[in-house]
Amino acid sequence: MESELYAKVPERANFVARLPGSGGGPSLMLLSHTDTVVADAAEWQLDPWSGELRDGEIWGRGALDMKGQVAASAVTLATLAREGFRPAGDLVFAAVADEEVGEGFGLPWLCAEHPDAVRTDYALNEGAGERIELAGRPFYICSSAEKMSSPFRLRVHGRAGHASVPGIADNALVKAAPLIEKLAAYRPELELGPETSVLVEAVAGRPLEAAEALELARELDPAAAELLEPLLSLTLSPTMISASERRNVIPHLCEVVVDCRLLPGQTQAEVEPLLREVLGRGDYDLEWIEGRGGTRSALATPLWDAVESFVAEIEPEAAVLPVCVAGFTDSHWLREAFGTVAYGFFPTRTMDPQLAARLIHSADERIAVDDLELAVRCFRHAAVQVTGSR
Ligand SMILES: [Zn+2]
């Protein structure tokens, strides 16, 4: 198989392998990242770097996020190549160096510097795939959209003074307090995007308005409502504040950082007037810190069909639900650079999804071998379905 390392710096190389298509068919990338977050061995029951197999599970940092998917994707290409599979469109395996911290060694760098290596029509990446039960019915979650991480800073202005004589100053920290309360009290208008409409209809059995859907979720299961609510609107969470550096100096400036997540398709330009209306007039500046992600892929695609037909094969009574996830993955780089249809789907049905969610980026991360094997079956199925066998 053709393979190549692409590196901005040698110790952070990206690996790309390719089964070239015979021409004409759509191309598919199995995308994964090789870096992990840190692990503190003292918190773990087993050595986090051991990769130890115990009771049907492989232990180690990155087992779920996402060295399991790196391995399953590599096995997919290797076995198909060994069997003589000849795709019509290119089948690509990309294991990129830098996703967790995002310092520009990984996929964004590849998209900018080596676009031909990573441009495909379709991509399967991390983000979802877990089997869940809702209203007594099994579903597999496939992420097709991501919210935009769009934090902003409020700089609230006042006038400094000695803290023993508060009357002579204008305390910026005190002026920030009502602004924070207004942000916390704000209830944005709820709306159903395309993914969430499909999800709600699949679970409820009929189309619902956003508010109705949230009400129904609250009746069915408070956990479902917690998951649904952030998919219906932007969210605002004030998380950081700084003011005076000295106890006896009244601050002339107070900075509040707000973690804000926009719905895919929402822009900072359309949200900013809303925020200013919520905050009202005052001595403050509002400045966006960044805007990342916030992309979606269409649902009626050959890759979606491949995910559905795989699920139908392993569990005929289960359905695939599209979700918009609150965080973002590398998928947004592909969508932005090439218009790639990218989904997050790594099917899991053996490990409890709530346990898996707790183990990611935490101690005792591990993956069920059965789930790894399931993913290989899924990726092989998708590769053959999408890139074509002739
Ligand atoms: Zn990850």
Image: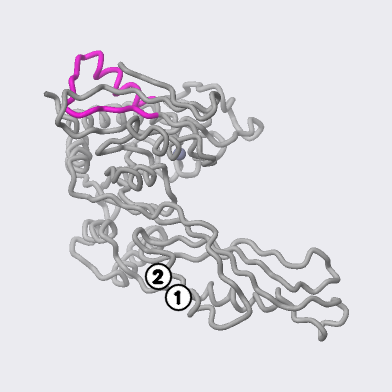
Q: Identify the mark at residue 273; answer none if there is no mark.
A: 1
Q: Measuring 30% from the left and 49% from the top, which residue is drawn there?
A: 144
Residue stretch rendered in magenta on the structure: 71-94
Pinpoint residue 62: horizontal percent, then vertical percent: 49, 32
Residue found at x 19% / y 61%:
205
Residue 186: give x, y in percent of width and height: 48, 75
SS category of the residue bearing label 1 = helix
Residue 270 placement (x, y as % from top left)? 40, 70
Compared across the picture, whether 387 is left or right of 18 comes to left
Quarter of the image for the C terminus: give it.
top left
Image location (x, y in percent) of residue 178:
61, 79
Q: Secondary structure at mark 2?
A: helix
Pointers 2 and 1 in contact (C-beta within 8 Å): yes
92 in magenta: yes
* Residue 257, above or below 323: below
Residue 301 belongs to magenta span = no
Residue beneath label 2, please?
270
Q: Nearer the viewer, residue 125 or 340?
A: 340
Q: How is the image coloured?
A: one colour
Q: Which mark is residue 321?
A: none
- 273 to 103, vertically: above or below: below
How far apart marks 2 and 1 lie (CA) works out to 7 Å
* Residue drawn at x 32%, y 26% as measured from the top left: 373
**Disc 2 residue crowd, few under 14, some 14–19, many 20+, Cα 10 Å:** few
